[in-house]
Image (cartoon, rainbow, N blue to C red):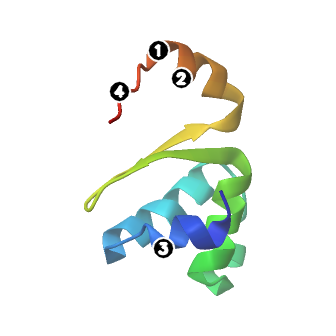
Amino acid sequence: MTGRELSENLNYLGMSSGIRKLALKEKLATAEELAVMNEVEVCDLVANEYELVYAENEEIGLVRKDKMGEYNKLVTVISR
């Protein structure tokens, strides 16, 4: 997943804010750095550490890349 792909799944302003908060919480950048970054740049930071596992209209699911093995063991996907 790229930052642009993640950004395209942020349907609401609150989601963009949530991505910035996640980047700050995970110390992917300082508050000052995040303040001058555009949405795609912030999403690039997050996409380097997280994988998008689902995207719905009002929420997205992200899993740390180092936890994907554990996630895949827990989830069973049924598709058409």
Q: Nearer the viewer, mark 4 or mark 3?
A: 4
The residue identified by callout 1 is 74
What's under tag 3, amino acid-wise?
Glu
How many residues crowd mark 3 within 10 Å: few (<14), some (14–19), many (20+)? few
Residue at the spot 59% in from the left edge and 17% down from the top edge: 70
Tag 1 or tag 3, which sits nearer the N-term?
3
The residue identified by callout 2 is 71
- Residue 50 against residue 73 in the figure, above or below: below
Residue 64: image x %, image y %? 62, 37
- Residue 47 against residue 44 in the figure, above or below: above
Near-viewer residue (35 or 76):
76
Q: Are marks 1 and 2 in contact (CB under 8 Å)?
A: yes
The residue identified by callout 3 is 8
The quarter holding residue 4 reads: bottom right
The residue identified by callout 4 is 78
Near-viewer residue (17 or 57):
57
Label 3 secondary element: helix
Tag 2 or tag 3, which sits nearer the N-term?
3
Disc 1/disc 4 C-alpha distance (Å): 13 Å
Disc 1/disc 2 C-alpha distance (Å): 5 Å
How many residues crowd mark 4 within 10 Å: few (<14), some (14–19), many (20+)? few
Q: Quadrant of the N terminus?
A: bottom right
Residue at the spot 63% in from the left edge and 46% down from the top edge: 50
How many residues crowd mark 1 within 10 Å: few (<14), some (14–19), many (20+)? few
Label 1 secondary element: helix
Q: Quadrant of the C terminus?
A: top left
Q: Nearer the viewer, mark 1 or mark 4?
A: 4
The quarter holding residue 23 reads: bottom right
